[in-house]
Amino acid sequence: MIAALLLLAIPADLRLSLHAGEHHIEKIDWRAESVETEGPLRAELLPSGNELLLEPSAKGVGRAFVFTRREVRVVEAFIDTPLPPPPGKPACASVANAACYAQFRAAPQPRMVFELEGLQAEAKAAQEELAKAGLPNLEVAISPWGVKLKGAKSDAEKRRALKAIWPAILGPLRLDD
């Protein structure tokens, strides 16, 4: 609901190393409703319901955003590009403020403890990502149960907003409808 912060990448739920022109089928555990991509990657849900067809087209990093009823899962494909090294540990013990949020955003951990100011920093960063994506009319609210988007006129606009805020959200991107 506010503005500010930085632009760092949050690790995806799944990272793969692929080659351009080679199709790849990945088994997924998520009950997916739809998939959208960005970068040099095309993705399609297969009729089996638990498989994702990935078609890398050029060198670079592509992402497949897999939308389930309440979560957004991200498959990141490094196409003819090396995987980045694993991030280090943040100096902060918890996401206590904006500075600690920046550290956790650069090096996310499997378990994180949030304090109010850290949660506010995350909400500010998510709202800034919406503005950058051309969706300043939408508002994001963050609760212990997930993310709420206010003002989305359609499912397509909601998916676009979720893709935009994904880098700002620490941990799983869950929907609190």
Image: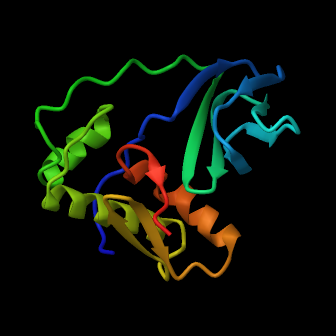
Residue 85 location, quadrant: top left
Left/right placement of residue 102 relative to residue 77 reads left
Q: Position of residue 67 (x, y in %)?
A: 64, 51
Tell me if I can see residue 80 in this picture.
no
Tell me: 30 left or right of 98. Answer: right
Can you say whether 114 is above or below 161 in the image? Answer: above
Colouring rule applied to residues: rainbow
Left or right of residue 7, residue 153 in this image: right
Residue lying at 44% horizontally and 69% vertically, measured from the top left: 148
What is the x, y in percent for residue 80? Answer: 66, 18
- Look at the image and tell me whether residue 100 can be seen: yes
Number of dots carrying numbers:
0
Residue 43 position, x and y percent, is 77, 39
Q: Residue furthest right?
A: 47
Residue at horizontal 47 percent and vertical 54 percent from the top:
174
Relative height, residue 130 to residue 101 (above, below): below
Question: Residue 30's image quarter?
Answer: top right
Q: Split into 4 quadrants, where in the image is the N terminus? A: bottom left
Horizontal and vertical percent for residue 68? 64, 51
In the image, 23: left or right of 155?
A: right
Q: Residue at x 31, y 52 (%)?
A: 6
